[in-house]
Image (tube, rainbow, N blue to C red):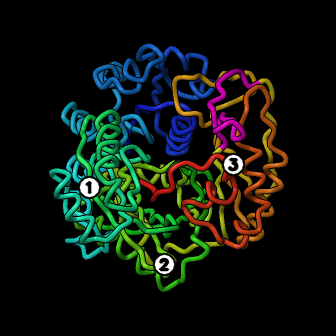
Amino acid sequence: MFQRILVANRGEIALRVIRACKELGVEVVAVYSQADRDAPYLELADRAICIGKAPSVDSYLNIPRLIAAAEVADVQAIHPGYGFLSENPQFAEICRSCNFEFIGPPHEAIRKMGLKTEAKAIAAEAKVACVPGSDGAVADDAEALRLARAIGFPVLIKAAAGGGGKGMRVCRDESSLAGALQMARNEASAAFKNPSVYLEKFIDRPRHVEIQILADAHGNVVHCWDRDCSLQRRHQKLVEEATASTLPDSVRAKIGEAAVRLAKTVGYVNAGTCEFLVDPDDNFYFIEVNARIQVEHPVTEMVTGIDLVQQQIRIAAGEPLPFRQQDIVTRGHAFECRINSEDPDNDFRPSPGRITALKIPGGPGVRWDSHAQAGYTVPPNYDSLVGKLIVHGATRDAAAARMRRALDELVIEGVKTTIPLHQRVFRNPDFLAGRVDTTWVERVLMPSSAGRQAQPA
């Protein structure tokens, strides 16, 4: 086991990794930008090092400064968390070339999975179904038109080098294809410095189901079952649950097996998530791999009892997985609500500022993952996540009732939050019956603020 780990991140995930390290008896070094100098979680680290000014490029995205901090602190490993540099193959490669273990997959696997066109080719090799579409980036508008006619409209234009809804456009007929391609290329170039796009068949009203995988360096790969992340707004997840309540058990088994095959084919090591679209007939199609720990990992932890962050650290230290596939069973049901400092009644406008009061819910089966406290100032520089409210119950209905109670107990004052939206979700009969898809929030819950209706990236 490592003696000392550096956490190359901030906020909720930095605190989550700090806690995992403490339970493993590992010293932990936190880094922070000037905007985060007063973050309460820094006091829990054994050492905290300032790495730059508030902008991410000067701090959390600055590889030389992170490596310098790791050298000064004499750590053996670096945990990237999620976001920032967590899926940057160059960062993973530099960490290892500087003799720091990167707590994540090999840089080759990150690079292969980072380009969706290459990821689809690997999925095909692993005999995992993909959404029908182009084999790679389209060369020009003429090729795109030929492919679109072959696939059949509507089609989805997607950025080859990224996700999160950037560089994504739904095109429903030939007349709008050229304009949609240009807009998608412009967005992709601005977001990822790569204008390449590819085409997929547009699947109307899909569910977004993902599989949590763990793979050690000894050839063992398992999945920790599934999560449903269909509740989204503009491709950003709002609520996640484990397991996917509408997925038939036969399909659940097949999609888990497909994720394991894919991980083995690419030579994956550490934690990761294989994401799929599931159509109304329960056919599933691979869309991408997230080569990191996910924001929504707690719901899997709640139903399996597996500490995924500790497993990440143990795997990176060379330990074999302590369980086999048949040992991993799920118990009950779990939900997670992402509580963001945004105003859902004003097009989700960010609401940075000082939290003047914070009352955290408790009771059986309730978990609150957050770096925020009363008096904490939510900075305008980063993601607006304030905390994650997670509940577990014996059944989906019991977990939903517990979440309603917990949301009513949760009080955050001083900034606008998404709590009112989540309260509406957990009182909606469609959601409670599992009748949702990736467009449901914008079609049904908030039709007045509907944006582009497309598949998740």
Relative image position of residue 37 (x, y in whole percent): 55, 16
Residue that carries the numbered disc 3 in the rendered image: 389
Q: Are marks 1 and 3 in contact (CB under 8 Å)?
A: no
Q: Which residue is mark 1?
A: 198
Horizontal side of residue 312 vs 44, given as left or right:
left
Which quarter of the figure has residue 123? bottom left
Three-letter amino acid code at the position of disc 2: Arg
Query: Amino acid under label 3?
Result: Leu
- Residue 452: x percent and y percent? 50, 51
Quadrant in the rendering for residue 29: top left
Q: Are marks 2 and 3 in contact (CB under 8 Å)?
A: no
Residue type at mark 1 is Tyr
What segment carries the magenta color?
A: 339-355
The residues bearing labels 2 and 3 have C-alpha atoms spaced at a distance of: 26 Å
Q: Is residue 170 above or below residue 205?
A: above
Of the two numbered discs 2 and 1 on the same chain, state the one appearing first in sequence: 1
Q: Which residue is mark 2?
A: 252
